[in-house]
Amino acid sequence: MLAPVRRSSWLFLSVLGLFGCAKPARDAHGIDYPNTVTPALPAAPRATSHVPSQAPPLPDQAAEARSNSAPSSPGFGSSTFASDAPVLLERASRDGHWLALCTARKDDNGDGRLSASVGPRGELQGDAFERYLIAPDQELPIEGLLGADASGRYALVMQRGALVLWDAERRNSLDLSALGADARLSAQSFSELRTVAFDARSEHLLYVRREQSGKRIVIRSLADGSERRLDPGPGVIWRARFDPGGSFIVVELISEDSNKNGRADFPAPLTNTPRPCSAGPGRYHTWIDRGDRPVTVLVPLSGGAPRLEPELVMPIGEALLLRDASGALLLERAGKRRVLEPPLCKGRIVHADAQRGLFIVGCAQKKTGRVSLELVTETTRKALDIELASVELDREVSEAPRLVALYPGPETMLFDADRRELIALQGGGVVLATRAGRALIRRGNGLLFYDADSHSERALPVTLERYPDLRLNPPFVFVSPALVNLDTAALVGVSSARPLALSSEGQLLVPEVEADASELARGPLRWLTPSL
C-alpha cells in the first residue's frame, strides 16, 4: 500500500519558509489561502545609464579573420582528430573531452566520393552513416548516445545491443544490460531513456531492474559502484527519474488496466534500437490515448514508503507543488496545504526558485488571451506589471538565477530575484544569457552587458553577424563572431568559424570544411581558442 511520505520540516523551512511567518485565512477544510493580491509591482526604472567601453571598436574585418583563432584543446592536443569525411555532431561533453558523432567513411553509393546532405525531413542522404564516441586516443563504435551526466564525465551509449555506462576519466565501460537494466526506449520523438537517469550532482545513476519480486529502482553510486534498491509499489514502471532537487524519485507507474483490455499497456511503443543518424527527427511521432494511463508516484530518497501523487506538478525541496481538480495551485508540507493560486487563475509555473522561496505564476486572461504574471512568496502574492503571449506548460524548478528573462512579451524584461523587481531594458533586444547580476544582450548587430546593481549598460567592441550562431556553455557564450566570458563580462576573442560546439573552457569545435546548403560539415575536427 502506498503510504504518506515523512518530510523534514526544518529543511522545508530553510528552503521556502512558506509557513513560518504568514498567517493567511483558513477555510473550513483546513486549507490556507494566500493574502489578497496587492497592487501590481511596477518595473524598476528603465536602464538609461550607458557606459561605453574604453576599448576602440574592432573593425568588421577582424571578425572575418580565422587567423585570430589560436589552436587549443580540452584533452585532444593541438592536432586534428576524426577522419576526412562528412560529419554530424550529436553531442559534446561539457568540458569537450569526448564527442558523439555520426560520420560517413565508406563510399556506399559508389559515386567515387564521400558525401552527404540533409533531406527535407532531416534524413541523411548520400553515403551511409555510422556512430562513434570519440575521446583522445579512443574511438568506440556505438549504436546510439542515450544520455550523459551534467559534468560530462559519464555517457550512456548503446553498444552491440547493450546499454553501457562509459567513464571518460577512467576510460572504462560498465555493461548495465548485464546487470539487468531495462534499456528499452520509447518510440516517441525526442524521447530520452525511460528508466535510466543521472542525478543533478553527477553522484548517482538510477536504473530499473527486474527481480523475482518485481521491478525495482536501483540507485548506483558512481564513485564506488555500491547500489541500493527502492520499491515504487505495485505496477509497471513507464518512466523514472530524479527530481531536480534531489529529494525524490519521480515514477510514472501503470498500476491499473485503464483501457480494460486485460493487460498493462505502455502509452507508446517500445524499441530496443536508437533512432538512426539524422539532422533532426523531421517528423513527430505521438500516440494519443494509447495504452493505460500512468499515475505519478514519489519515492523518497531518504527512505520511507512511496506515495501516490496524481496532482503533482513538481517537488520543491521536500515540499510538493500540486494542482487539484479545480485547477488551483497548492503547496503541501507535512500534510498541510496552502493555496498559491486559486482556480480562477488557471496558473502555470513560469519560474520556480526553491532557494529564495518564490514563484512566478502565469494566469490566463480571457479577454486578451495573454498571460498575466504574479509573484508568489512566503507571505504574499503580487501582480507583476507584465503580460506574456502564452504559457502552456509548467517550467521545472530552476537553479535559482538572480536574473530571469521573461518571454515572450511585448518588451524585453528581466526579473531580479534578489530585489524582487522587474527591469525593463531600454531599446529592447534579446537576452542571450544571465550570470549573477549580469545579462548578455543582443541589440541589433551589437552586443552589450547589463548590470543589475548599477542599472547600467556596457557595449562590447564587436559587430555581430546578421544571422549569428549561438552556443552557450557557462561561463562562455559564443555569438558569432564573439566569444564572451560571463564571469568577467569581457569579450575574449573573435572567430569567423561556425563551431559545432563550445567547451566550458571557451574552446570552439570546428570542422575542416564547414557545412553549406548542399553538404554537411566535413572533418577532420579541431578545438581552437578565439583571440582578439
Image: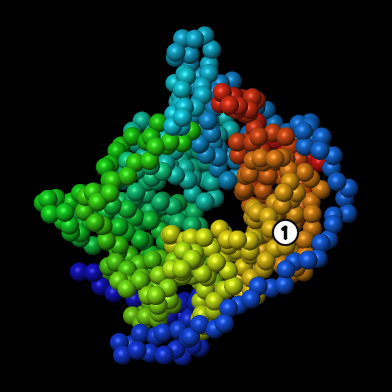
Instruction: Name above or below for residue 273 compared with residue 353.
Output: above
Colour approach in the figure: rainbow
Classify residue 115 as left or right of residue 345: right
Residue at image x 25%, y 72%? 3
Instruction: Name above or below for residue 453 compared with residue 492.
Output: below
Quadrant of the snapshot with the N terminus? bottom left
Residue at image x 66%, y 34%? 498
Image quadrant assignment for residue 226: bottom left
Q: Tell me residue 398's x, y (percent).
A: 52, 63
Instruction: Name above or below for residue 39 compared with residue 46.
Output: below
Q: Amino acid at mark 1?
A: Gly
Q: Nearer the viewer, residue 485 or 345?
A: 345
Q: Nearer the viewer, residue 42 or 194?
A: 42
Q: Residue furthest left?
A: 262
Quadrant of the snapshot with the C terminus? top right
Label 1 crowd bin: few (<14), some (14–19), many (20+), radius 10 Å: few
Secondary structure category for the residue under label 1: loop
Residue at image x 60%, y 61%? 410
Image quadrant assignment for residue 323: bottom left
Please indicate, yes or no, whether residue 215 appears anywhere in the rendered image.
no
Q: Residue furthest front?
A: 367
Q: Tell me residue 117's x, y (percent).
A: 51, 24
Please indicate, yes or no, whether residue 275 appears anywhere in the rendered image.
yes
Q: Tell me residue 66's x, y (percent).
A: 76, 31
Q: Nearer the viewer, residue 25 or 101?
A: 25
- In the picture of the structure, the residue carrying the numbered disc 1 is 427
Q: Tell me residue 481's x, y (percent).
A: 72, 40
